[in-house]
Amino acid sequence: MEDLNDYKVLKEELKQYEQLYNEIKIASELTFDQITVLDGNAKILCVGKACQSSFGMSEEEVIGKYAKELEKKGMIDKSITLEVLKRKEKVTLVQHTGGNKILMATGFPMFNEKNEIVKVINISKDITSIEKLRKQIQNTGEIVEWFEEEISKRKIIEKEEIVSKNCEMQKIIDLIKRTADLDSTVLLLGETGIGKGFLANIIHKVSNRKDKPFVTINCGAIPENLLESELFGYVEGAFTGASKKGKKGLFEIAKDGIIFLDEIGDMPMQLQVKLLNVLQERRASRVGDVSPYKIKAKIIAATNKDLKKAVKNGEFREDLYYRLNVLPMYIPPLRDRIEDIPVLINHMINKCNSKYGMGKKLSKDGYNMLLSHDWPGNIRELENVIERLVITCNEDMIDKEQVSDVINPKNNRKERTFEINEIIPLKEATKKLEKQMLMSAKQSYKTTRKMAKVLKIDQSTVVRKLKEYHID
């Protein structure tokens, strides 16, 4: 009789457990993406209907398994049940499942009267789509940030008034934008007056060091006996006349900004050795000191000399040349950028008019004379000539005579349309002349039909040649 009563009690308990099981399943299917119930040994007792999609396994395959088994099989990357059993408290974490789902799971411990965990109920919410959206937003933010950075660089370049239609100059501008943030040493090459210092400044302004110091030194303008102390600094009593407090060198002052070594080709051989060591070791010492300091500054060097030729003649160290020549940028002279001259003339006249509150203009003949000039001093010479013409001419219209007085002050020689100062292949000379004539005709005659008539060639030839020489 007692056994029969025990059986009835057990049967009633089983019914209650079955009812509880069904209620949990119904609740999980209605309110959550997934509910799992495990016992105190992390054995799975019950799972919701989303088991297959969540874990990549069917309900039959999961029930009876242990949480540790699911981890080993890769069904979950981290078991929340094991964390609950370990901490003995409610736990929330993000799970990645074998069904390629991302779940936000919370595990609730259930205790008996002995404060032992007898059940763990895990409630999970599928946040896969939310996580994907977050990543999309993050990626979009990174793209927007990149675009903003590119727009910022473009605005800086426009603000600093880099005016050029020359394809080689466009390549240099693009290279500056792409490499400004790199720590690589930059070597600017080109004739005097071409704007090497200007471009060095642009590199600083568009780089991630724009808020850090930009320090310039002309290696050819400082006496040899002072150049080392200027570059690297000195300590008290290093030499006669040295400050009692010592002095920081430009490399120290630059910190983690940029140091611009202009006219590097004129650096004395003795200092070239020390600079080579600085570039190799990224350390330097003040004159009279043995304790080195770390060099963090990005280095930009510039010269108007042919360093390869200087190396061959023994005037420049070959190893230093290769250390400097990491990211070379050759800036072509103005005579090889004929298409830039009209743009620069107009830009500089407008700039000077705005600066001095004037309204000066160039006559056609005056304009053509400026176009035909060689500009051996490059952009610096052109800038000086334009400013002088604007402030010295009494009339609003600047004519040929005024231009001639400024660019040929001694003999007022006749306007030249083309000149070759060295022997070059005839084909190359012909192309240069052809390009200059097209530029001049384009400036004087606005339509290709009129240009063709003056040049006595077909209009289709004019159109083709303008495209060939990138003349807008």
Image: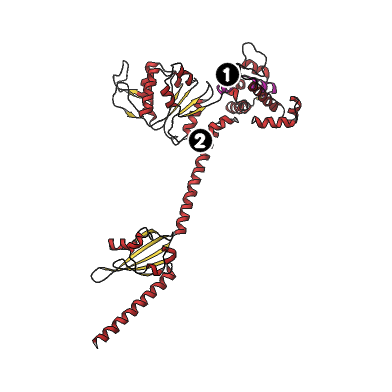
Q: Residue at x 35, y 29 (%)?
A: 281
Amino acid type at circle 2 is Lys
Kindly identify the residue that appears in the image at 24 percent across and 86 percent down: 2
Q: Position of residue 9 (x, y in %)?
A: 29, 82
Q: Which residue is mark 2?
A: 177
Q: Which residues are magenta?
A: 362-384
Q: Between disc 1 and disc 2, whose residue precedes?
A: 2
The picture places residue 279, in percent across and down from the top left corner, at 38, 27
The quarter of the picture where the C terminus appears is top right
Residue 115: image quadrant is bottom left
- Taking the image as shown, residue 86 lies to the left or right of residue 160, namely left
> Mark 1 and mark 2: span between their CA atoms?
28 Å
Residue occupied by mark 1: 376
Q: Nearer the viewer, residue 285 or 349?
A: 285
Helix, strand or loop status at disc 2: helix
Question: Residue 39, can we see it?
Answer: yes
Establish if 332 lies above or below 143: above
Q: Is residue 137 magenta?
A: no
Q: Amino acid at mark 1?
A: Pro
Quadrant of the rendered image containing residue 13: bottom left
